[in-house]
Amino acid sequence: MADLSLRAIESSNLPATQKSSLRRLFDGAMSRGPGGYARAKLHVVSGAQAIRKGGEGVVVGGALGAASVYLKGGLDMRVGEMSIPVDAAIGVVGLVGSTVFAAEGYAEDMANAGQSALTVFAFRKSAEYFAKQAAAPKAKGDFGFDGYSSDRIIQAAANM
């Protein structure tokens, strides 16, 4: 493979305008300013963070999925008369923990895990709610009002 370096270009017999253009291209690619290397570094860092956050979401979602199967009562644990949603509790602990331990390196991981757990909680509870709404009987037809209701407004309306 040919060894192409800036020195080789400068010592070549290329016209000065082309050498200058190549020099600007090289400087832009290697600069830490608004172009080149700095932009590439931003994309690499952003990509690595996306992979990290996605991985954390997969781990939290997988753990909550396993817990919903293996815990008695699924993700809603009964404690006495109360039902505690495990996913919401993990979410709150993660978000509060990330604030309490903000100076620690794992604070962002706690926030990401808390966010993922709350996403699972919101999905689960909204799916339950909308499933009940879809299954609820719809009112139609005769309601069987016979005029003997104890509500005075309904009686007054019936007598009109």
Image (spheres, rainbow, N blue to C red):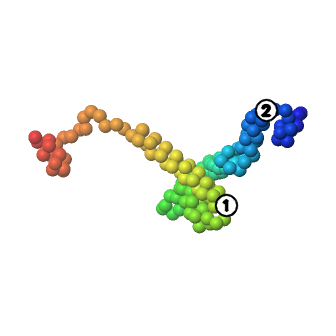
Image disc number at residue 24 = none
Q: Secondary structure at mark 2?
A: loop
What is the quadrant of residue 40 in the picture? Answer: top right
Q: Quadrant of residue 146?
A: top left
Q: Are marks 1 and 2 in contact (CB under 8 Å)?
A: no
Q: From what the image shows, is residue 136 above or below residue 90?
A: above
- Image point 10% across, 40% down: which residue? 160
Q: Is residue 157 visible from the viewing direction of this image?
A: yes
Q: Residues within 10 Å of mark 2 (few under 14, many from 20)?
A: few
Q: Position of residue 112 (x, y in %)?
A: 61, 54
Query: Which kind of residue does numbered mark 2 sit on?
Result: Pro
User: How far from the left and from the top, in percent, is residue 83?
Assistant: 50, 58
Give the amino acid at mark 1: Tyr
* Image location of residue 86, percent across then percent down: 57, 56
Q: Nearer the viewer, residue 54 or 82?
A: 54
Which residue is more in the foreground, 71 or 16?
16
Residue at 51%, 63% (x, y): give it. Answer: 80
In the image shown, does 115 or 17 lie closer to the viewer?
Answer: 17
The total number of labels drawn is 2
Which residue in the protein does label 2 denote?
15
Q: Image point 39% across, 40% down: which residue?
A: 136
Label 1 vs label 2: CA separation?
Answer: 55 Å
> In which image quadrant can residue 5 be found?
top right
| Image quarter hosting the N terminus | top right
> From where the camera sits, is residue 47 visible?
no
Counting from the top left corner in percent of width and height, residue 9 is at 83, 37
Residue behind mark 1? 106
Q: SS at mark 1?
A: loop
Residue at the front extreme of this rendering = 16
